[in-house]
Amino acid sequence: MTQNVDIILINAIVLTMDADFQQFEPGAVAIQGDTIIAAGLETEICLAYAAKEKIDCQGKVLMPGLINAHTHVSMNLLRGLADDLRLDVWLMGYMMPVEREFVSPEFVVLGAKLAAAELIRTGVTCFNDMYYFEEDVAKAIAEVGLRAICGQTVLKFPSPDAQSYEESLGYAREFIQRWKNHPLIVPAVCPHAPYTCTEEILKAAAELAVEFDVPLHTHISETALEVENTRKEQGMPVVPYVKKQNLFDAKVIAAHCVHIDDGEIYTLTHRNVGVAHNPSSNLKLASGTAPVSRMLEAGLNVGIGTDSSASNNDLDMFEEIRLASFLAKVATGDPTVLPAQTTLNMATHMGAKALHMGELIGSLEAGKRADLILVDLSNLHNTPRFRRDSSNIYAKLVYAGKSTDVTDVMVNGKWLMRDRQLLTLNETELLAQANEYAGKIDAFLIEREQSVLSKLIAIEGVEEEESFEVQAKVSLEDIAAILEAIEKANIEILHHRHYHQFDTYFHFDDTSQGLLRYREDEISDVKNRITNMRYRLTLIGRAREGHFPSDVLLSRSRYLAPATHSLRFYREYFEPSGETFIEKERQRWRVLYKGTEFYINLDQVKTPDLGIFLEVKSRTWSRRDAENKAYLVTELITVLLSRMPEEMVTQDYLELVSDKEKHGKYVA
Ligand SMILES: [Zn+2]
């Protein structure tokens, strides 16, 4: 007796991608509602089932839809914004500042729809996403009809959708509760990466994922630098570190895993972690080559992803599949690793397992969701076709097939594309809206790039608050004399410290931008042992009122920020026109003189060898205060110098004293 079903797809080369890699030709697939009822030889399927609708696939390949294992789909709106940069400069210097400014529910919806159109066109039926306002992404994707894991990002920094990680976690919890049993969307939590999260965040995210039995999606060991830093700070590589935070109690999907060793591969396998391999992104950002063939040997489930359109720059899974295979071959020097069938499996069935969705999707088998695509291999670049070996068809798809060969896409039993026409999206409208957004982002970046200060604010979140300082500086010949003078003078010493300072000054062609100083302080105790390191950035404005020929006294604006990145990062981000390096030994006293606090600095400038300088300075938050203190600064340095033999003091100082009146006028 025949069973009635909704649709039977006939006359196809059916690649089931099941455990035995069964193929049927001419094959057929029977679908009822959202579910595959059977896949097999056309003759057998047509005998067993009767359908309201029989669709002739015209000899095309009928296979499971591709699974994109790692995306940030809304970033499609940032495609081509900043390229050819190192990961940290790209992420912290461009992506995150632009995201803080622009990312809104409206932004993520448009980006997600733009991506959805591209995903459908390239044969993707399910993807694993991580971004902000992910509930809005989920709504847009559900409306389009694609399947996705939508993961809410949690970070230790304020993000576009939350001021704190507690807020993000709260948002993730509510989102998960609301979407837990949706037919297309699997909600998830995404602690962005170990280095952008704290131990507390990782633990809390894992707990949340376990509580609701939803996936936890994160980036792991993407760059060598990340691993090096984790080793330095935690005394172990990234995988053991996150394991210690109970991350693997959850169903984890780890993107990248480029720099992991065999022990870490064992841990990931043992804890059933799914890996998302992103060949284009790893190549473009020069992150390295993930040890995929060793992962597969160990039995790890590895899927393939595109990562975001900003680091790829497209969502073409056909390209990723081919690259995954080529990259593994060249990395191992072995052309037999990652054969076409294995690689296609990574983008379908194994990819589904990597996303912890292997029971539901990834192959054309009875009981699984009807997520499938038709691929036309009758065109020029796919011709001729050999049938001698059943693996020929996989090689054709992986090595010669193109995403444009995809003609039809079905998700959950519903067509999203028929004969290359998108059925649930208006492509023309999306293109116009995306270009309109690009215009706004362009304008924002053009304005930001005009000023070193605004670039600094964009990455370090500096408060836009000026501080001023007045200083008097003289060059000396003898350290001992000044040490004695400080003791003899009638001043109260509050604090005394010893630093070894390494300053790099960035100059800019436009001198009105000021100077940007990157300072590394080695702070030593009385026994000259290094007790601490400190890294700071200071944007030093041009001396506003000009200064004396001998650089004696000046007042200027300063913006301070902790330096959270490397000198190399700032060099690549600010692109100075020149640099000056200064190394000095500094003794610093914080003192009280006539009821006012001052700093006395005694500097021995070693690189370049400039000798010894005595500096008295005071820092204030207003120009008026700075001006009021100018006289006292001059007076204090005079007091100190008067306690020293006259021949110790160079010409600069004498000029200063004789210029006292002028100072008054100058600062007033
Ligand atoms: Zn990513």
Image (cartoon, grey):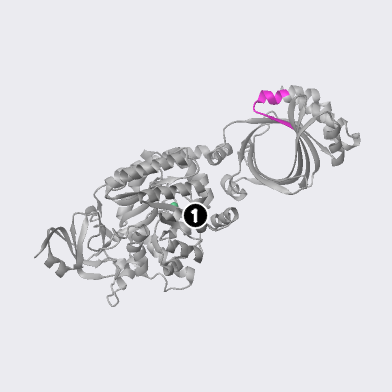
* Lateral position of residue 82 relative to residue 322, left or right: right
> In the rendered image, which residue does mark 1 sit on?
242
Q: Eyeballing the image, is 93 above or below 637?
A: below
Q: Residue furthest left?
A: 1
Q: Residue at x 86, y 36 (%)?
A: 484
SS label for mark 1: helix
Badge 1 local density, few (<14 within 10 Å), some, or many (20+)? some
Q: Residue at x 37, y 60 (%)?
A: 354
Q: Position of residue 202 (x, y in %)?
A: 47, 49
Q: Position of residue 21 (x, y in %)?
A: 29, 70
Q: Which quarter of the image is occupied by the N terminus?
A: bottom left
Q: Eyeballing the image, is 643 above or below 121?
A: above
Front residue of 629/408: it is 629
Q: Residue furthest bottom?
A: 388
Front residue of 127/213: it is 213
Residue range of the region highlighted in magenta in the rendering: 617-628
